[in-house]
């Protein structure tokens, strides 16, 4: 998947990230997804956070 197409979302309220299993999932837990994505892609957390934020802005705010 091209990096300019990826977003981060949550399956709230179900399937919380591993460190939070057993708790209700919340959007504030998306940082766990970002951490995992960064590791898998060989990028820093800040790099992947900027990419996904820019993509979300382009999707929702650029009309």
Image (spheres, grey):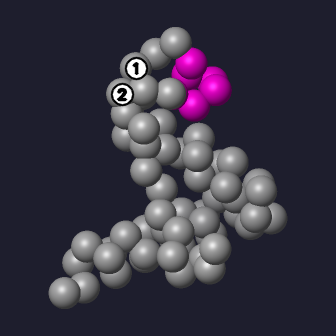
User: Residue at the location (64% across, 26% down)?
Assistant: 18
Which image quadrant: the C terminus? bottom left
Q: Residues within 10 Å of mark 1 (few under 14, many from 20)?
A: few
Q: Which mark is residue 24?
A: 1
Q: Which quadrant of the view contains residue 46?
A: bottom right
Q: CA distance from mark 1 to mark 2?
A: 5 Å
The location of residue 21, given as percent across then percent down, is: 56, 18
Return the residue found at the far front. 1
55 vs 36: above or below: below
Q: Nearer the viewer, residue 1 or 16?
A: 1
- Decide if residue 9 is in sight here: yes
User: Residue at the location (53% across, 45% down)?
Assistant: 31
Q: Which residues are magenta?
A: 16-21
Q: Assess whether mark 2 and mark 1 are in contact (beta carbons under 8 angstroms).
A: yes
User: Residue at the location (23% across, 78% down)?
Assistant: 61
- Decide if residue 28 is in sight here: no
Q: Residues within 10 Å of mark 2 (few under 14, many from 20)?
A: few
Q: Which residue is mark 2?
A: 13
Q: Which quadrant of the view contains residue 17?
A: top right
């Amino acid at each position: 998947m091209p990096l300019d197409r990826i977003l981060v979302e949550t399956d709230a309220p179900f399937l919380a990230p591993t460190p939070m299993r057993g708790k209700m999932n919340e959007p504030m837990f998306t940082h766990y997804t970002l951490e995992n994505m960064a590791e898998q892609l060989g990028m820093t957390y800040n790099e992947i956070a900027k990419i996904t934020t820019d993509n979300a802005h382009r999707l929702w705010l650029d009309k």
